[in-house]
Each structure stands twice: as structure tokens, then as C-alpha cells.
Image (cartoon, rainbow, N blue to C red):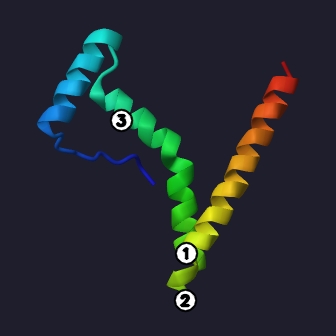
Amino acid sequence: MAAASVEIKLSEQAAKLFADYERYTNVTAEVYINELVDKTLPTLQAMVSAFEECQDNPDAVMEVFGRKMGEMMLEQKQAQQEASESH
């Protein structure tokens, strides 16, 4: 699947905060939001996976989501440990 663009409308408060943040850090709102989305992809992936697994039982979605998040966190922790051991 090709990359997609999304246009969002920021509240006045959010726009001001992002402008101030950019002034201090030289990080634009676009970069900040893109990094935030990238960092939360495992959560989105776990949620979608839970919905797919529980199509016939919507009441089980949150339980499956919690399990999948736990699995992803464990995998991430193991990957970090392996990376630190290899350095």
C-alpha cells in the first residue's frame, strides 16, 4: 500500500502550541505528528488485529487488545535487550 496523506485541522490552541514548539525546537507540526503516529502504530496494529480476531464477538475485543499489546511490549523489550547486548 502506498503512503497516504491526511489533512487535519488544528484547534487554535494546538496551532499556537505547535508554532511555539517549532520556534524552540525547529520541529514542525507535521514532523511531530508523523513521529507520534509512527510511535503509536503498535497500538493501532494491536487494535485492528483484535477487531479482526473478534469479528464474531465484539465483547472480547478489549481483552484480545490487551493481550496483543502485552505481546508487542514483550517483543519490543526483547528486541531492545538484544540490541543492547550486541553493542
Look at label 1 and name its amino acid: Val
The residue shown at (53%, 82%) is 59
Locate residue 19: give its quadrant. Answer: top left
Q: Which mark is residue 4?
A: none
Question: What residue is rendered at 75% in x and 33% in y?
Answer: 80
The residue depicted at 75 percent of the width and 40 percent of the height is 77
- Measured Cα–Cα span from mark 1 to mark 3: 27 Å
Residue under label 2, please give it. Answer: 56
Query: Which picture quadrant has residue 11?
Result: top left
Above or below: residue 30 compared with residue 72: above
**Foreground pick, 83 / 15:** 15
Horizontal relation, residue 14 to residue 61: left or right? left
Asked if residue 86 lies left or right of residue 6, the reply is right
Residue type at mark 3 is Ile
Amino acid type assigned to the residue bearing label 2 in the image: Asp
- Disc nearer the start of the sequence (2/3): 3
User: In the rendering, at what x and y percent does residue 76 appear?
Assistant: 71, 42
Q: Quick one: 24 or 86, which is closer to the camera? A: 24
Residue that mark 1 sits on: 61
Q: At 75% from the left edge and 47% from the top edge, which residue is drawn?
A: 75
Q: Residues within 10 Å of mark 2 (few under 14, many from 20)?
A: few
Q: Position of residue 87 (x, y in %)?
A: 84, 18
Residue on which the image places disc 3? 33
| Secondary structure of residue under mark 1 | helix
The first of marks 1 and 3 along the sequence is: 3
Sequence-wise, the earlier of marks 2 and 1 is 2
**Is label 2 in a helix, a strand or a loop?**
loop
